Image (cartoon, helix red, strand yellow):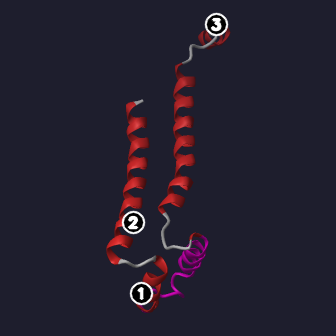
Amino acid sequence: MDAALTFLLGFVQASARAGTEVETARRESGWDDERWWAANAPLLARVLDETAYPLAVRVGSAAGAAQNAAFDPDHAYEFGLEPVLDGLEMLVDSRVRSRRPRSRRAATRSRD
């Protein structure tokens, strides 16, 4: 139980940290994502070989357009929370099932 809680808290802390870092960078630079991309797109175009990584380029472009940002910490948290909780639920369920006493009939059959 403690490990599950530690795992969940780690996810929440990482999400909160990412959100804080994004907000701090925006506040300190005075730049929004649109301005950052306008300034850095030429450099990225020179160092990122679109033919070598076409899937990464397509996914990155689609995600950026959908989120209106290179990274949206709120979206990442919302996306990640459900699988984290579902995974913990599956783990707990499997541990509970493995600790249930077998029925009398199943115990009798296993002795045969």
Q: Is residue 61 left or right of residue 41?
A: right
Q: Nearer the viewer, residue 64 or 93?
A: 64
* Sequence-first tag of 2 and 3: 2
The spot of residue 70 in percent (x, y) is 49, 73
Residue of label 2: 23
| Span highlighted in magenta in the image | 46-66
**Secondary structure beneath label 3:** helix
Within 10 angstroms of label 1, few (less than 14), some, or many (20 or more) residues?
few
For discs 2 and 3, the disc positioned in front in the rendered view: 2
Q: Quadrant of the N terminus?
A: top left
108 versus 70 height, above or below: above
Query: Which residue is under mark 1?
Result: 40
Say which residue label 3 marks: 104
Name the amino acid type tagged 3. Arg
Q: Estimate the x, y position of residue 111 in percent, counting from the top left.
A: 59, 10
Q: Amino acid at mark 2?
A: Glu
Residue at 51 percent of width and 27 percent of height:
95
Question: Do the CB atoms of the residues marked 2 and 3 lie less than 8 Å apart?
Answer: no
Hey, which residue is sitting farthest right in the picture? 105
Q: Residue at x 52, y 31 (%)?
A: 92
Residue 64 picture location, percent across and down: 55, 74
